[in-house]
Amino acid sequence: MTIPDFQTLMLPVLREAASGEVRIGDVVERLAEDFQLTPEEKSQLLPSGRQTVFYNRIQWAKSFLGKAGLVEPTRRAHFRITPRGEQVLNSAPERIDSRLLSQFPEFRAFREGQEVSADTSTPSVAVEEDHLTPDEVMRKAAKELEAALAADLLQKVIAGTPAFFESVVVRLLIAMGYGGSVSELDKALVGKSGDGGVDGVIDQDPLGLDRIYVQAKRYSDGNNVGAGAIRDFFGSLDRFKANKGLFVTTSTFSPSARETADLLSKRIVLIDGTQLARLMIRHEVGCRVEETLTIKKLDEEFFE
């Protein structure tokens, strides 16, 4: 099965705490068995690589239960059920989620950034059912923003001239650490009539001991690069006595084009529009950081 969302985990976490003081690590292990998670699911990490997804979701489930006063911390990494938590558990709920927790004023105060009832004596029906943890919401939003930015970048590149696209590719390679500096951009760009099918030549290392020959094709979406274009580029590399080439397009490569690149004797790396946009974002070519959000967590060692 897939890893349960953090709200699905709220009731099981509360049931674990009903036996007395429990350690969060033990709860993670027992619930992983109860939900029959595979070794891969149990070891799946967050993008930060510092914590597993399952552990993170149980931590958030415990945190939300704590905000509603159903569990309370005892010592480092340990918690227990409260009298209020016992009352909720004795009511035999089929599920505990944010909607159920919103009956408690403390929880509504915790989530006051969302739409809640002005009357704290009654539960709000406007609390949105959200199966993602707050940090997962941020990561999901970040992915959506990045996807939108990638589409905008590609649209701008396609709308430009072929010469502009060639300069974008070389700028990206320089930003990735190849060649020299942006001031040497003109030296790297060689695309012109009679260029032999090569749009750019850039040093692979700072000393220029090896070079990468670049072909940049600005195609609209749906106009894929075929095997013929790869073979032509291979011929260009042969004329320059080059061993390595980089073929970049704003569209995609056909399966036969990728197969041809794999079979040829020279190393030719293919970068399609999707990869190009991701690299531009990662290395801040054509975009910039507008705002940085930092996620902080409690330092348990500080309070020991």
Image (spheres, rainbow, N blue to C red):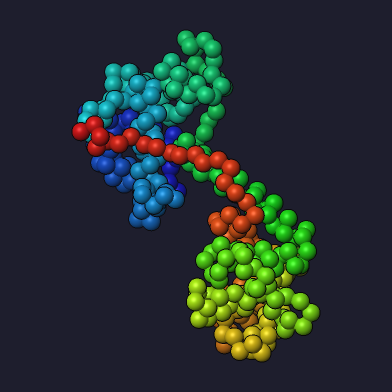
Camera-nearest residue between 196 and 141: 196
Q: Residue at x 46, y 19 (%)?
A: 108
Residue 97, visible in the rendered structure: yes
Q: Quadrant of residue 300?
A: top left
Q: Left or right: 182 with respect to 58?
A: right
Task: Identify whether 264 is placed above or below 58.
Answer: below
Q: Is residue 166 above or below residue 243?
A: above
Q: Residue at x 72, y 84 (%)?
A: 196
Residue at 54%, 15% in the rendered image: 117
Tell me where residue 169 appears, x and y as whole percent.
Answer: 65, 66
Q: Nearer the viewer, residue 226 or 40?
A: 226
Residue 268 shows up from this direction? no
In the displayed structure image, the side of residue 116 where residue 272 appears, left or right: right
Q: How many marks?
A: 0
In the picture, which quadrant includes the C terminus?
Answer: top left
Q: Residue furthest front?
A: 183
In the visual, does 94 lie left or right of 73? Answer: right
Percent across and percent down for residue 215 are 67, 75
82, 297: nearer the viewer: 297
Which percent across, then down, holds residue 178?
54, 69
Q: Residue at x 67, y 70 (%)?
A: 186
